[in-house]
Amino acid sequence: MKSAADFSATGRRKTSVARVRLASGKGKFTVNRRSLEEYFPVETHRIMIYRPLNVANMLGSYDVSIKVSGGGKTGQTGAIQLGIARALVERDEELRKPLRDAGLLTRDPRKVERKKYGFKKARKRFQFSKR
């Protein structure tokens, strides 16, 4: 366990990048200078963001400051989740195993596949006509 008060990490998902800072406090979340409830009105997103802290039993013991950019809300949520998990591991290496077992330290590599020439989308083709 480190002695410094602040721990920071970066999380990525799709095209979203989240810079997360953990500071000892009362459990206040700030996302792009707004409250978590204001930035993520959907409760499912907030539950995903709290998950690393729940696994580590530290919900309410850190103030979390987040700067997130790119992508949509779901991608940003995944990026924040990975960033928080990485910051917790930086704080205490013993948390690596429970966070890894919960699948919170693996970066999701899936991205949108590019559109191909002669196709409508990445894989969808135009309608075939025999005559």
Image: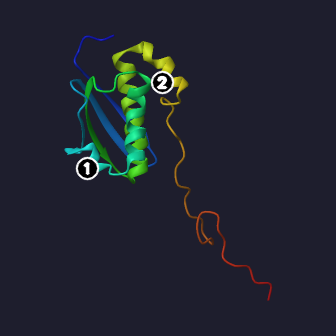
Image point (48%, 24%), residue name: 99
Q: Amino acid at mark 2?
A: Leu
Instruction: Determine the residue positioned at 34% across, 22% down.
Output: 58
For residue 13, side relative to residue 8 (left or right): right
> On the rendered structure, is 23 left or right of 80?
left
Q: CA distance from mark 1 to mark 2?
A: 27 Å
Label 1: element kind = helix
Q: Position of residue 49 (x, y in %)?
A: 38, 38
- Sequence-wise first label, 1 or 2: 1
Viewer-proximal residue among 25 and 129: 25
Q: Position of residue 30 (x, y in %)?
A: 23, 39
* Residue 99, disc: 2
When asked about the image quadrant of residue 46, the answer is top left
- Where, quadrant-wise, is the N terminus in this rendering? top left
Q: Point out the image quarter for the C terminus.
A: bottom right
Where residue 28 sits: x, y (%)? 23, 33
**Mark 1 lies on residue:** 38
| Residue type marked 1 | Glu
